[in-house]
Amino acid sequence: MKKLILLGAAVALVIAFATLTPSPPVCSWDFRGSLWGPSYMLLHGQTPYSFETPYGPYPGIWMPQLIGAFFFVGWLPCWVAAKIWFLLELAGLFLMIWLTAGRKLPPPVLFGLCLLLIFLFPPVYIHFAIGQISIFITVLIMLVVFFSGEGHAQLTLRWWMPLFLAIALAKPQLGVLVYPGLLVGAYHRHGVSAALRLVLLTTGWVALLILPVALMDPGWLQGFLQVTLGNTKVLWDLPTLFVQLRLGLGAPGIWLWALIFLACLGFVLWLWLKRDAQTALLWSLALTPIATPYCSSWDFLLMAPLLLWLLLHLPSRLARAALVLGVLLADSGQIAMRWNTSISDGRNWWVPPALLLVFLLALVLNKVTEKRSA
């Protein structure tokens, strides 16, 4: 009963906070351009994918199944829809903590540390400021594994798993390690038929979610291809090793990135075969900003679930202290770079490797402490 009261109070505070905060003059840039705007245009007889939009110069680039799933937001004023989206994403952060804690509230001190590390992480602020979707995608993927079975090693296929995976493909570049891992995990635990069924059902849900878009705009595909291909042709200064190594080293940089990608993929596939599904998923998410060719700094939030899990489950106080201090040091570096200046997103490329080193240091210290106490 006490936990329900605390949870209710937290929900009430979040709703009050979202209601009382003033609406920004620009209604959450990416949310407006890639979800609310396309949905609004679709409901008003226009193509959702266009370079000529009534709400700004940037076309929608999120996948059409997301618009099909949430097209109703186009009926709402943008500022109302943006606040609902804000609440959804904020709830996602608390859900991350709950899931990594074992589907329960952590002890108060650890819960406070979780909030500290999450809300001091600079990508969180950028994510909320522009109305991004990385938190939502991360939570959907986590739910697929953390609710797939009673045991950590389970990966029981549920009917809603392909639906969540289909929606999470709104940004497919964030699934370059996760989706191959899920397929290998399904095959390893349930055979070829289970992996094939997961592919077919996920594809079916994608097609079903696109149906509202196709019915309201039969010519949507032409606009989608035009916008998507146009966006991929732009040489964005992204904080990925793929982009930064190519800019710094040319063709050899691409080969070096390919080796890093294959190493990350091989490692996570090994985890899906040899370790429990939750551990494999956490590392698959955390390594994605290093392996993927296309992501922005707000997508670094994919590393948050592993950070939370380490904080909540490492028994060594020394390891936890090193984890907290290391993450805060990385946060300080990001803040110092942005202090009273504007920088390109590509300059944040060092953050995922730095956080990964902090995670590995914490694991090593935890192992050393265990050996000394044995």
Image (cartoon, rainbow, N blue to C red):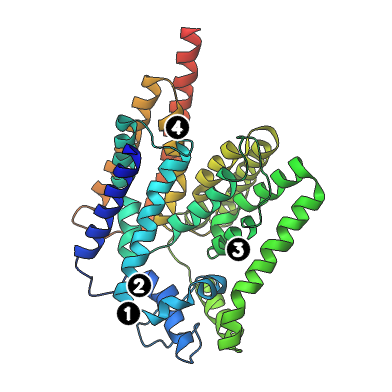
What residue occupies the far right of the structure in this picture? 192
Give the amino acid type for the residue marked by disc 2 in the picture: Ala
Query: Which numbered disc, 3 or 4, marks the residue that appears first in the sequence?
Result: 3
- Residues under labels 2 and 1: Cα distance? 6 Å
Tell me the element at label 2: helix
Q: What's under tag 4, amino acid-wise?
A: Leu
| Kind of residue indicated by mark 3 | Ala
Front: mark 2 or 3: 2
Residue 37, horizontal then vertical, whole percent: 41, 80
Check disc 2: other Cα within 10 Å, few if <14, some if 14-19, many if 20+.
many
Tell me where residue 200 sits by quadrant. Answer: bottom right
Which residue matches tag 1?
77
Identity, as a three-letter code, of the amino acid under mark 1? Pro
The residue to which callout 3 is attached is 166
User: Mark 4 to mark 1: distance in Å?
Assistant: 41 Å
Mark 2 or mark 4, whichever is nearer to me: 2
Marks 2 & 3, CB-CB < 8 Å contact: no
Q: Which residue is mark 2?
A: 81
